[in-house]
Image (cartoon, rainbow, N blue to C red):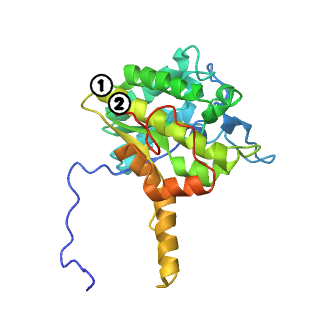
């Protein structure tokens, strides 16, 4: 098969969303201000003299200046995450009005500058109070996320039309150190957490479609191409296996409602099958 070289490059469509992205704990700072509760990311601490997540880029206080700079750069879109513990300090109790007001003001500022907001609902920063109750291993966290999603959709759904439920869920399974500052859960626990995240994401997706039919929503897995090291059939099979487990698993469940057969077999053979509350073997059963 010959290589494809374009003789004439096609222009990007006029409505293409050029932009950039951040996550709340990496830019906001203000880790304990205006009623925000602690998240598991607040347990990370840097060496003396080095800024950590408590300050970060101080976006919480400088967001208007930051948005102005985005507009000056020509950005058409800005993907950011919402800190669950800023909106609901303990993850499941009362809404923190000052917290949700920050995100309302940020969205309004973006729209005033002609920048499309794209919201990630969860990006590695589980409320610490939920973690102390078992975190994503505890099925109650699914219910807490569903309630959190409803609050976001009620308060921002009239202005935000692009949503991402969970950022890089596969990274939280493969490289859990991205989320945990302390003891890392076992592989069995991580795949149970992953399953519960699938259910939470599906519930939020269904909810948004009902509340705001014109909006779009989906997961944000870390997907990459996996190539065999050589043409040896064993290498080819290894690459296909890893791609199915590392990448496609996290899109298959979102798009089809079930685990792909190879990933499910891997879970069975390594005694990692999660407890499934409803549905058949390997299926979410959410319809």
What residue is at 49 percent from the left and 66 percent from the top? 241
- 128 or 230, which lies in front? 230
According to the picture, the residue beneath numbered tag 1 turns out to be: 210
What residue is at 59 percent from the left and 41 percent from the top? 192
Q: Are marks 2 and 1 in contact (CB under 8 Å)?
A: yes
Residue 23 image offset from top left, x and y in percent: 53, 42
- 183 or 6, which lies in front? 183
The quadrant where residue 124 appears: top right
Residue 108 image offset from top left, x and y in percent: 37, 27
Q: Is residue 149 left or right of residue 12?
A: right
SS at badge 2: helix
Residue 126 image offset from top left, x and y in percent: 61, 34
Q: Is residue 161 left or right of residue 57?
A: left
What residue is at 32 percent from the left and 46 percent from the top? 76
Residue 88 image offset from top left, x and y in percent: 57, 21
Query: Badge 1: how crowded within 10 Å, few (<14), some, or many (20+)?
Result: few
According to the picture, the residue beneath numbered tag 2 turns out to be: 206
Residue 284, can we see it?
yes
The quadrant where residue 57 appears: top right
Q: Is residue 266 above or below residue 229?
A: above
Q: Is residue 212 above or below residue 42?
A: above
- 275 or 116, which lies in front? 275
What residue is at 58 percent from the left and 29 percent from the top? 139
């Amino acid at each position: 098969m010959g290589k494809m070289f374009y003789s004439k490059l096609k222009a990007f469509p006029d409505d293409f969303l050029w932009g950039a992205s951040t996550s709340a704990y990496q830019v906001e700072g203000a880790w304990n201000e205006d009623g925000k509760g602690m998240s598991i990311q607040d347990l990370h601490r840097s060496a003396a003299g080095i800024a950590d997540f408590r300050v970060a880029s101080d976006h919480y206080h400088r967001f208007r200046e930051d948005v102005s700079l985005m507009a000056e750069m020509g950005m058409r879109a800005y993907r950011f995450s919402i800190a669950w513990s800023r909106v609901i300090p303990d993850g499941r109790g009362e809404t923190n009005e000052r917290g949700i007001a920050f995100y309302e003001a940020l969205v309004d500022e973006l729209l005033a500058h002609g920048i499309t907001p794209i919201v990630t609902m969860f990006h590695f920063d589980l409320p610490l109070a939920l973690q102390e109750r078992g975190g994503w291993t505890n099925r109650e966290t699914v219910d807490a996320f569903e309630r959190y999603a409803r609050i976001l959709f009620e308060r921002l759904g009239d202005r935000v039309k692009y949503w991402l439920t969970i950022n890089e869920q596969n990274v939280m399974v493969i490289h859990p150190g991205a989320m945990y500052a302390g003891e890392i859960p076992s592989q069995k626990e991580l795949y149970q957490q992953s399953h519960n995240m699938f259910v939470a994401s599906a519930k939020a997706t269904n909810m948004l479609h009902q509340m705001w039919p014109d909006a779009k929503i989906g997961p944000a897995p870390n997907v990459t191409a996996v190539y065999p090291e050589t043409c040896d059939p064993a290498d080819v099979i290894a690459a296909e296996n890893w791609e199915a487990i590392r990448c496609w698993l996290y899109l298959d469940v979102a798009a089809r409602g079930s685990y792909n057969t190879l990933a499910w077999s891997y879970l069975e053979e390594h005694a990692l099958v999660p407890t499934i509350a409803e549905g058949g073997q390997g299926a979410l059963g959410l319809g």
